[in-house]
């Protein structure tokens, strides 16, 4: 499992902080950020690598998190969530089998961003009754 992370110019500082935190926690992190990319390009790059292996997860950071969320939800089979709190990050893994989260650097602070990332990557999909909704989401694109 790898955590694929990326950011546009507005999310660079927070992305670096989250990346360092996850690496210190022992996670394999791949940074797909490239200079000059906007949130659309970054999100597509993250999603592409998330889809390379079933266990991969993605985090995209821009100013508000909304743009990357909209991009990710257009990708067939991708379940994504825009999050700004730890509980939602954890629960979107457990109930929705989300593979990408998006965050806004102008919305969440440093410690909260680390806690969101930790909740997301440590969350496990519960399956069971939730699979019906996940199947419905996957059929939408």
Image (cartoon, rainbow, N blue to C red):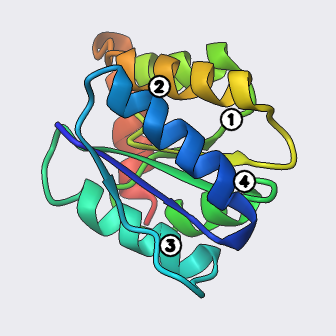
Q: Residue at x 86, y 41 (%)?
A: 107
Q: How many marks?
A: 4
Q: Quadrant of the N terminus?
A: top left
Spatial CA span between label 4 and label 2: 15 Å
Q: Residues within 10 Å of mark 3 (few under 14, many from 20)?
A: many
Label 4 vs 3, first from the N-terminus? 3
Instruction: Please report contact status of discs 1 and 2: CB closer than 8 Å, yes or no.
Output: yes
The reply to whether dot 4 and dot 3 touch (C-beta < 8 Å) is no
Numbered badge on residue 120: 2
Give percent across and percent down for residue 64: 81, 54
51 left or right of 36 in image = left
Q: Which residue is mark 1?
A: 83
Q: Quadrant of residue 136?
A: top left
- At mark 2, the secondary structure is helix
- Residue 14 located left or right of residue 47: right
> Mark 4 = which residue?
65
Position above or below: 64 against 81: below
Dot 1 or dot 2: first in sequence order is 1
Is residue 7 shown above or below 13?
A: below
- 136 and 103: which is toward the camera: 103
- Residue visible at 39% across and 35% down? 134
Give the crowd class for mark 4: few <14, some 14-19, many >=20 residues within 10 Å: many
Task: Check disc 1 and report its element: helix, strand or loop.
Answer: loop
141 sits to left or right of 27: right
- Measure the alpha-carbon separation of dots 2 and 3: 19 Å
Q: Residue at x 32, y 19 (%)?
A: 125
The numbered mark, 4 or 2, whose residue comes first in the sequence reads 4
Task: Check disc 3 and report the residue beneath it.
Answer: 42
Q: Give x and y (percent) for residue 11.
A: 69, 59
- As drawn, which residue projects farthest toward the bottom? 36
Q: Which quadrant of the figure contains the C terminus? A: bottom left
Position of 64 compared to 11: left or right?
Answer: right
């Amino acid at each position: 499992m790898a955590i694929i992370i990326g950011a546009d110019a507005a999310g660079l500082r927070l992305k670096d902080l989250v990346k360092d935190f996850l690496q210190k926690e022992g996670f394999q992190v791949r940074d797909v950020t490239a200079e000059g990319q906007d949130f659309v390009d970054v999100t597509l790059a993250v999603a592409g690598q998330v889809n390379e292996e079933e266990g991969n997860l993605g985090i995209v950071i821009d100013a508000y998190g909304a743009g990357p969320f909209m991009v990710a939800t257009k990708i067939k089979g991708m379940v994504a969530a825009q999050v700004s709190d730890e509980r939602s990050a954890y629960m979107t893994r457990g109930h929705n089998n989300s593979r990408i989260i998006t965050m806004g650097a102008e919305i969440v602070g440093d410690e909260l961003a680390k806690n969101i990332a930790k909740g997301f990557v440590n969350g496990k999909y519960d399956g069971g009754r939730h699979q019906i909704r996940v199947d419905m989401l996957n059929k939408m694109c």
